[in-house]
Amino acid sequence: MTKPQPVLYLDSARGIYIPRDFAQSFTKTKYISGVSNTDLEILEEGPNGALYWDVWTDVLNNAIITGDDGIPYFLSQDNDLWLIPVGMEWSAGSFIWPQS
């Protein structure tokens, strides 16, 4: 069985609207956990909100996205927003699967 790989979710061309667009894509869905509906609502309002960036930091640190295939992912942003399979680790500048 092939291990899942990172997925480019939102590219950097969205700029400061990545958090807003992320939140809008998960409104009232069963595929996200670790994030409150209130957090998503704050992000949906856009970057002019006072709590936008603080909430986005919390979302990046806590959200787990479950794909249609049942694979859980965490978020990583390096300009682009990536879904990284849970269990992958950061090493030498990229995400890798640890050696078994």
Image: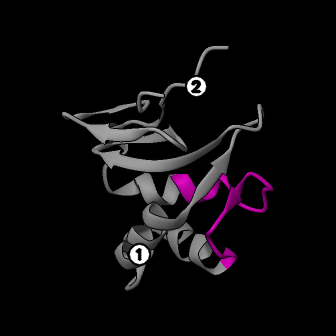
Label 2 neighbour load within 10 Å: few <14, some 14-19, many 20+: some
Disc 2 marks which amino acid? Pro
Coloration of the structure image: one colour
Viewer-proximal residue, 3 or 98? 98
Residue extending furthest top? 1
Magenta stretch? 22-37
Residue 67 x, y percent position in the rendering: 70, 38
For mark 1, give the secondary structure.
helix
Left or right? Give the position of 23 relative to 89. Answer: right
Label 1 neighbour load within 10 Å: few <14, some 14-19, many 20+: many
Q: Residue sitting at 47 percent across and 30 percent down?
A: 6
The correct choice, above or below, for 76 with respect to 20 in the image is above
Q: Are marks 2 and 1 in contact (CB under 8 Å)?
A: no
The correct choice, above or below, for 99 with respect to 86 in the image is above
Residue bearing the label numbered 1: 52
Disc 1 marks which amino acid? Tyr
The correct choice, above or below, for 86 with respect to 27 in the image is above
* Label number found at residue 66: none
Left or right? Give the position of 9 relative to 94. Answer: right
Left or right? Give the position of 81 relative to 26. Answer: left
Asked if the stretch drawn in magenta spans residue 7, the answer is no
* Label number found at residue 4: 2
Viewer-proximal residue, 91 or 5? 91
Q: Residue sitting at 61 percent across and 74 percent down?
A: 41
Task: Tell me which numbered mark, 2 or 1, is placed earlier along the sequence.
Answer: 2
Q: Residue sitting at 31 percent across and 49 percent down?
A: 15
For mark 2, give the secondary structure.
loop
Residue 32 x, y percent position in the rendering: 68, 57
Residue extending furthest front? 100
Residue 29 x, y percent position in the rendering: 78, 56
Q: Residue sitting at 78 percent across and 62 percent down?
A: 28
